[in-house]
Every structure is written in C-alpha cells, then in structure tokens.
Amino acid sequence: MLPALSTVLACAVSITACGTQGDSAADGVNAAASGSPTLPGALDALAQDGVKITSMTGWSHQKTPPAISAEFEVTNHESEPFTYTITFDALSTSGAVLENTKQTTPAVGPGQTVRRTVRLNGSSPDLRGDKGRVRIAKVRRVPTAEAPAETGPCPSSGMRLTTDAGNAAMGYA
C-alpha cells in the first residue's frame, strides 16, 4: 500500500510542476511589436464594459513632464443613457503603473458611441522615449438619471454636502 501511495504522490508532484513561467501571456502583456497594427496590452486592458482603447502614443520625447495619450470610445449598449467613469493607467514598458487618471463621459445615449482622448502626465523626465502604454483599469457606469452631479473632485472625506436655497426644511415651496 505504501509503495503505491508514494508512486501516486510522485506523479502528482511531477504533474503539478509542469508548465512555463515568465511567458508574456501570463503577466497580461501582449508582446506586440513596435509599429504593429495591434495595440500593446492584454485584450481585457484595452476593452471592457463598453469602453475600448483605439490608439495610443508612447511617452513623449519633447514634453516635460512627459505625457502619454490614448484615444478611446465609449459605446452604450443599454436602452437608456449611461454615464461612464473610466480609470486609465499609464504603464512603463515593463508594465509598472506610473500614473492614473479618471475621466467621466456623461450621458452616452442608447446605441451611441462617443470618442475621446485621455492624456496622462508622467512624474519623471526619465520616461521620455519609453514606449509605455495605457490600459483601462476600471469602468464604472451608472444610468445618467442616477449619476452624481458634476461639481468638482470628491473631497477627501468621501462625502459631498450640498444645500439648496435654505427653505426646503422649512416647508416653503
């Protein structure tokens, strides 16, 4: 019984040890060559929840701070208007997240496609010449009727207090 068990365990160990490490698909990077018609990055980083990156630039050579940009489109497949808040990450050639930003595309009508450009500034002049790329980190979409009002950045407390004319609590019309 013991020799049979040790043979089974040895096979299990050798089977689970199979595979490759360090291939580009495992770390979410599509090894698209420079000048290739395909965009660099994993497919889920280029399109999700109706948002799709259609083109991008590498880190700029001339600007300080260096900048990277991507053109994207938002398509609403729902039957009512939606507001999309998209978080974009700027990545170095090695895949490290260097910067991120949020961009809101309000009131995208049913069946409508809206095209925009996002630009991210790098914090280090050493990025000039780095090919880099942009990915979609997160998409938040809500029906436009339920979307929060655009009144500036969210305060650090995470709560925004608003007031009216001061007469709502008093019962005045």
Image (cartoon, grey):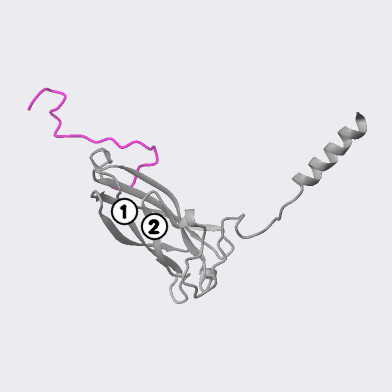
What's the residue at 92%, 34% (across, down)?
3
Q: Is residue 115 left or right of residue 30?
A: left
Q: Secondary structure at mark 2?
A: strand
Q: Which residue is mark 1?
A: 75
Q: Position of residue 163 (x, y in %)?
A: 21, 34
Q: Which residues are magenta?
A: 151-173
Q: Secondary structure at mark 1?
A: strand
Quadrant in which the C terminus appears: top left
Question: On the image, which quarter does residue 168 sit in?
Answer: top left
What's the residue at 83%, 37% (across, down)?
9
Q: Determine whether label 1 and label 2 are within 8 Å by CB.
A: yes
The tag on residue 111 is none
Asked if the magenta segment contains residue 133, the reply would be no
Asked if the magenta segment contains residue 164, the reply would be yes
Q: Nearer the viewer, residue 128 or 169?
A: 128
Q: Which residue is mark 2?
A: 52
* Residue 151 seen in render: no
Q: Nearer the viewer, residue 109 or 92?
A: 109
> Badge 1 local density, few (<14 within 10 Å), some, or many (20+)?
some
Going by the numbered disc 2, the residue's amino acid type is Lys
What's the residue at 44%, 66% (across, down)?
68
Q: Nearer the viewer, residue 19 or 64?
A: 19
Q: Is residue 53 left or right of residue 164?
A: right
